[in-house]
Amino acid sequence: MACLRQARLGFGLLKETLACELAAAKSFQAQESLALPSSGQMHMEAGKHSKTVEFTLDGCDKVRPQCTQCVRVGKQCPGYRDQLSLMFRDESTKVIQKAHAQWGVLESSENGDASGSSPTSSSPSSQSSRSRASIASSASSTSPISPDGGRLVPARVPREVQATSVDRAVQFYLEHYVIGLPDEARTGQELHQERWVFSPTTRDVMAAVGFASQSNLTGNKELMALARQQYGIALRGTASSLHSANPQDLDISIRAVVMLGMFEIVRDDGLPTKGAQTHIMGGAALMRNLLPFFQSSPEGLRGLLQLCFSMVATVMCSVQQLSPEPNVMIPTCPVPSMGQGILPPTFFEQISFGSTMATAEDMPSAELIGLLSRFVQLSARVRSQLLKDGQPETASVLREALDIEKHLDSWERNQAGIWVVVEEQVEGDFFPADAVFEGSYHAYADMWTARVWTNYRFARILVNQLLLEAIERFPGSSLPIVSAEQQQKSYDVIKRVSRDTLVSIPTHYRHPRLKRQHRELIEKTRGGAGIGAAQIPTLLFQLKVAGAAPGVPYKNWAWALAMIRTIWADTGMLQARRLGDLLEKSREGNLPSTVFVKVEEE
């Protein structure tokens, strides 16, 4: 109980976010004059209420085994519909016959999509759970897309089998942020085995992310207003869930906190990482104080360190994204505010605690997070002041960057055991060229080590980019510090690590073009991912870094840009579109503005 009380204190950071989000939702509603659903309406949409309540028009609290309204009026509660079964249901002959009878068609007639459209939303209909939907990056149509790329005619669906807008938002999340990603369910039916899917806490967050994603893809502002309202509900539910002393619910609480951070990345209001960082540090406090529940299992400590790595990546992304010169490491127009408290004090407490608790097997991850935190502070320092050739501060920055580079080089060379990375390649055109770079992929001991390596790579590229820019801009300061040999080595490292970053992508993100025979090879790396989608925001930043680095081949840039655009079209994550725009500006050449992704049924 003492641990849970401390966790609730760590989660207190989220209360401020809740107040801000509710205020933002009200402001958005007033500006756009949108008729948002009332709290009662939103409650009714959040899940199928009992049939008795359908006639009373009162809110159903969905208490089990009987809802309060049924008990109050003295009637037998008929129960509730299983929302997951509704989303990924098997359309039995009986249901189809009933639907056809209401449509007034013959039994031989067939219709396509049965998801229907909500009276409160103009969002696109969800696609089959057997394949993750693919949408062009310029997607704006409200018509569903068939597996072969053709447009389906919306079917008239009777209300008895019609999903609500919240149901479809949750379904969008499950199809695009869960199914098929590392260590997640491969099909909708496998989700029945996951407790968190049925939790009201995680369901509210899924709906928020689903609404926001669909709003981004369609430009429907009403969906974003619904997303913000669901987000406020989710924050309350997550805070309330932390009062439970049931250790079995810890995974649900942790997942909910991570998903709240995902919402901030998806909606991206111009400062996406600020809200995400709040959730990350709240999650880290939660993980640290709940470590006793994990006992001797490494999952607790690894979860804490993973959140610290996510914090570093979001801060670095923020530093670049908010800079007037996002594709350089040493700007000509510094922003003084960037050098102030770039990492919160609690962050250093968490990594210190992680280093103390790390076993010999996990020590490489603890060492790396320390190096990365040093580099983040150095980057903020460089962007907050105007460096000039011959000044002591410029020489100090160069020495610090060179020292970090040497430690990163040593870190890579010293890895053994579970930290060894194996590159495998399939000759010919077995893999789709836009899904697997040069037909190569990595095999790791597990997803945990794979994620640590990706964080290493973006830092290694950026620190060498900083050295190369300093050599060019400050020859007087760099000449006695950085040798010609080191200059050539920096180019070689950037080129090699950029390629490694692209080769590693299939391990973390399953491109919509990948089929079962492809995934059977790539999925050799399993276990330790926790939440499959949690790595996608970091992956987007790594793709941007690998594609925009100096000296990398054009094909690296083009492949990275196409992958970022595919992730944007697949998930509706607005940060993907923003980072893609930044990457595109790093070169004069441009790819076509639309990348179409075709997904075929297996």
Image (tube, grey):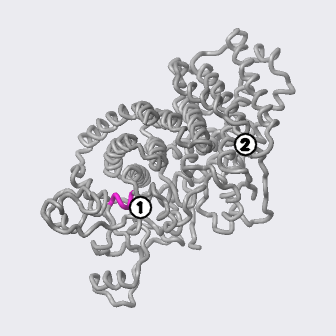
Asked whether residue 494 is in view, the answer is: yes
Check disc 2: other Cα within 10 Å, few if <14, some if 14-19, many if 20+.
many
Where residue 31 sits, quadrant-wise, is: top left
Q: Which residues are magenta?
A: 165-169
In the displayed structure, 465 sits above or below 117; it is above
Position in image of residue 601 (x %, y %): 56, 73
Check disc 1: other Cα within 10 Å, few if <14, some if 14-19, many if 20+.
some
Task: Residue 498: give its label.
Answer: 2
Rendered residue at 61%/15% (across/down): 386
Depth check: 270 or 93 in front? 93
In the displayed structure, 58 sits above or below 242; it is below
Where residue 595 sits, quadrant-wise, is: bottom right
Is residue 312 found inside the magenta-colored segment of the image?
Answer: no
Position in image of residue 554 (x %, y %): 72, 46
Depth check: 521 or 445 in front? 445
Q: Quadrant of the C terminus?
A: bottom right
